[in-house]
Amino acid sequence: MTVLLAVAIGALYACGIYLMLRRSLVKLLLGLVLISHAANLLIFTAGGLRRGAAPIVRAGEEALTRPHADPLPQALVLTAIVISFGVLAFALALFRRVHQSIGADDVDRMRSTDT
Amino acid sequence: MNLLAVPILLPLVFASVMLATRWPRVQRLLSVAGALGLFLVNLAILWQVDRVGVATLQVGGWPAPAGITLVADRLSAVMLVMTGAMGLGIAVYSLGEIRRRKQRFGYHTLLHVLLMGVCGAFLTGDLFNLFVWYEVMLIASFVLLTLGGRRGQLEGAIKYVTINLVASAFFLAALGVLYGMTGTLNMADLAHAVDRIDRPELLTVLAMMFLVAFGLKAGVFPLFFWLPASYHTPPTAITAIFSALLTKVGVYSMIRMFTLVFVQNVGWTHGLLLAIAGLTMVSGVLGAAVQSDMRRILSFHIVSQIGYLLMGLGLAGPAVAALHVPGRTLNDRAAMAVAALGLGGTVFFMVHVILAKTALFLVCGVVERLRRSASLDRVGGLATTHPVLAGLFLVAALSLAGIPPLAGFWAKFMLVRAGLEGAAWVVTTAALGTGLLTLYSMTKIWAEAFWKPLPAGELQRRDRVMTRGTRLLMYGPTFAIVGAIVAIGLWPASLEAFATRTAAQLVDPSEYVAAVSNHAIFSRSDRERAAMPADSGTSGEAPR
């Protein structure tokens, strides 16, 4: 499972970076989405995968019985998902506004402020 | 009294009240009052931390490492004070500079959200929480950057938003892997948890990931190209607050991580930091040399000054590595002296560069207000028409270049001494050469904007009239900041002593770690980490 997820993360990063290197704004945004998904999956996987051992204290026991899954990475991923949702929603609105005011989808035509 | 939550809560409360307020006048008043309150609270924190020692607060009463810790050591405290001071200065200045319509569109609310994010980043003792504060800061800065929606702003914002989202993804991935390897994200806990992992060579890889994530935010070579492409587009007050605070948060995070956590392989990591420092200084200042717009020149100088901040950190490498092992004292007095001078110089330089750069941007804003442009081809003769403005520019510019007896001289003096004593010849040469080129760049602005007569094509265009109130609002903060530069320059001893005390606290992290672990359950046996045996980083999926 870890290997499978590692391959999936690698593929997501690769696709995300490829999309970001294209010149279209829409593809740039999709690339950002894929990269943030890849980062979330990476946390999830790096935190350790364990099936069938929920970190819940059973009735009548004082502490968790080992081994149990680590709940923290999931909390981190959840927070990261919410944050990336908000930030990407802003990016989407910004890109739409840019498209409206410049009338192009091509980032090569947005170089007037470069140095 | 524990004030540590106040720098986060105060801007939050003021931002929410301003969001709900419909009267622009009340909003403006609240904005200045909130910034003033933040400044005073941060001063109180600095005073407390400097006298009593590292202050901590466990948010919600949950013990570390499961709960989030807020920590203020001297470095955090001085950064908080600078945040409060610049927040106050900019809040006043923007009342004069930014158009009323933009102010009504939530400018003041966003400014306070930005201040909240920056204060949170300086205070937190938890890596994931740092990520969250970064995002708070970013989303506020995104909107501030695009407020008004002119074409240039939008084009700059695309680069700014994209590169910052990539940096965040990098940061997130790095801290995810770090958690997988150590099982903690509390910085004080990490300081020793990293020594227990079984494959230390992987730590260097992680250190590089964090270096890229923070380096993108801080704008170091070769990751800074987004900065001069976007920082000159919004109103000057916004550029000034970005330049004062945002890149500095990146540098602060680097200082924290590379004195507290990543000190196992200093030959590589801190050597690399030194190389980056030299290249950042030189490339930034050379970039500035070819520009002909005041704000673009100053934007490149932001990059160049970041190099100096990293130089002190890089020089401290050997000492922080030696003192990392608990209970060990360092007999090598030379390495200790270099570290104290280097990190002390970084702290001194941080204070100086925030003041000097903000002052320069504020002067630039007045020029733009008067002449509708900051392009050097279109301005001139300001030294005769506005001698006070010229004087303010001159003091800030000379301080940035490092001319005695201004603040910049003492900051560079400490760093260069550290470089010479640490036998880091190349980076020291780069630092001195960059000082010279900075002077060249400042001379260029001086000669073009202030000395040369107004270009013939511009003669018929009159200066825009500034009312007395606007003048007061725009000149007041500039005067205060330039006054601080002169005061530090004339009486550097107390700031130098403080910077050295800060450096001592950074070189030997035991006080920081001890302060946090007072409220923590750090011992392995107590921690519920059955899912992850101490000896293997990533466990398989099969249940045992």
Image (spheres, coloured by chain):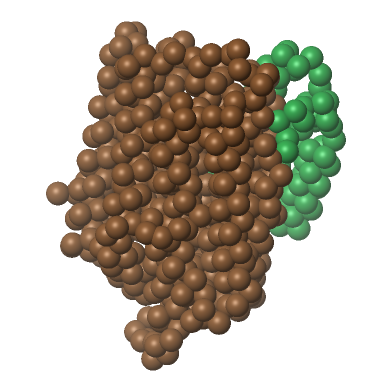
Chain colours: A green, B brown
Front residue (pair B328, B284): B284
Q: Residue at x 34, y 57 (%)?
A: B489
Q: Is residue A35 visible?
A: yes
Q: Quadrant of the C terminus of chain B?
A: bottom right
Q: As drawn, which residue projects farthest toward the top?
A: B22
Which percent across, then down, holds residue B207?
Answer: 60, 65
Front residue (pair A22, B385): B385
Which percent across, then down, holds residue B382?
Answer: 50, 30
Tell me: A74 left or right of B1. right
Q: Residue at x 35, y 46 (%)?
A: B82
Query: In the displayed structure, would residue B236 be above or below residue B258?
Result: above
Which percent across, then down, holds residue B441?
Answer: 60, 48
Q: As drawn, which residue projects farthest toward the left?
A: B1
Which of the 4 quarters of the picture holds residue B337?
bottom left
Q: Residue at x 63, y 74 (%)?
A: B426
Q: Residue at x 53, y 61 (%)?
A: B308
Front residue (pair B80, A68): B80
